[in-house]
Image (cartoon, rainbow, N blue to C red):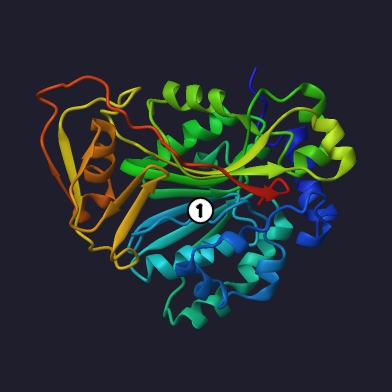
Amino acid sequence: MAEAVGSHEHDTIKEYYSKIIKTKDDLKTSACCASDAMPRRLRDIVKQIEPEVIEKFYGCGSPIPQDIDGCTVLDLGCGTGRDVFIASKLVGETGSVIGVDMTDEQLEVARRHTPAQMKRFGFERANVTFLKGYIEDLAAAGVADESVDVVISNCVLNLSPDKPRVFSEIFRVLKPGGELYFSDIFADRRIPEAVAKDPVLRGECLGGAMYIEDFRRLLHSLGCPDYRVVVSRKTTVREPSLRAAVGPINFSSKTIRAFKLADLEDICEDYGQVATYQGTMAECPTHFTLDNHHDFFAKKPMLVCGNTAAMVSESRFGRHFEVAGTRNTHFGAFDCGPGSCTEESTDGACC
């Protein structure tokens, strides 16, 4: 039976992030140091954000995708709003950003700094909205069906006690062709109950880490049979007591993108299609990285599988790509693996 929204587990997490953790320095796993890996295109924006917002923000990556000008973006578990404000600058005054969080203390910081942030960005009107609510029930928070272009989240989805409900809500609110782009902690096996119920391990993003294969199966059940890993970094738990508690489990921080597309297949198939990036994204004039094995160089044709062709042509990226070929002729399975890609190593659960 699914856990009720507003459950004891939610209360435990709210307690952890409102009463126990006051700033990043209070985290027990050297966690949430995403700024070190932040893309250069975002660093100048972060410099314009209030220090209190940064100090009380916790995340494990920089899940802000390219080409979101004019988009409606939804940040799940927005906390004090760092990523909301970054996205606010990038979507511009014609776009909008919605932040959802269940913790009053975090939302108070975000809302208090909103007027100053809008002024600092030179916006005449606020393009951000902060809503109190649970990520398992976005309808109750007021997020309508197919109303969002991009859903982002930064090391929050692991905290949910009902992940199937969270991802179901995500695909409900996404527009056709919309994108889920998030960073989170994953495990190489299912988490034992003792680890999952430990309040410290849960709050430090380890206890609720998703087993990567169960995550794959969950997306498939929701009509998304193909997701892409953009960045993956091994996570080292150095604190002896926590290391002993998690035992042989291996953790990694991954940034993942998935699209709401109707015709994706469960493996990559070869239809002889060729995709050419036009070099027209302002943030990516020379090349665009779709995932850890697709780096599109401007004006250079690349043979792609049917799923990749759909991702770059039937999403908001379609205006930047030319795709030649159809699915009329099938040539068998397509070798679309990450090849020689290796994982980087980081310390702590949320780095």
Circle 1 — which element?
loop
User: On screen, 220 above or below 169?
Assistant: above
Instruction: From the viewer's perspective, tell me whether residue 193 is left or right of residue 91.
Output: right
Give the labeled residue for mark 1: 63
Q: Which residue lies furthest to the front in this view?
A: 340
Q: Which of 112 and 190 is in front in this view?
A: 190
Question: Total number of numbered labels?
Answer: 1
User: On screen, 167 above or below 296?
Assistant: above
Image point (69%, 37%), residue name: 6
Residue 84 % position (x, y): 52, 61
Q: Which of 64 and 147 is in front in this view?
A: 64
User: On screen, 95 above or below 173?
Assistant: below
Three-letter code for the amino acid on which mark 1 is drawn: Pro
Q: Which of 99 and 186 is in front in this view?
A: 186
Image point (33%, 59%), residue name: 67
Res. 175 visible in picture: yes
User: How many residues crowd mark 1 within 10 Å: few (<14), some (14–19), many (20+)?
Assistant: many
Image point (18%, 57%), residue name: 299
Q: In which quarter of the image is residue 304?
A: top left
Q: Which residue lies furthest to the right in this view?
A: 241
Picture quarter with the N terminus: top right
Residue 189 % position (x, y): 65, 24
Res. 81 visible in picture: no
Residue 176 % position (x, y): 29, 39
Residue 233 % position (x, y): 59, 45
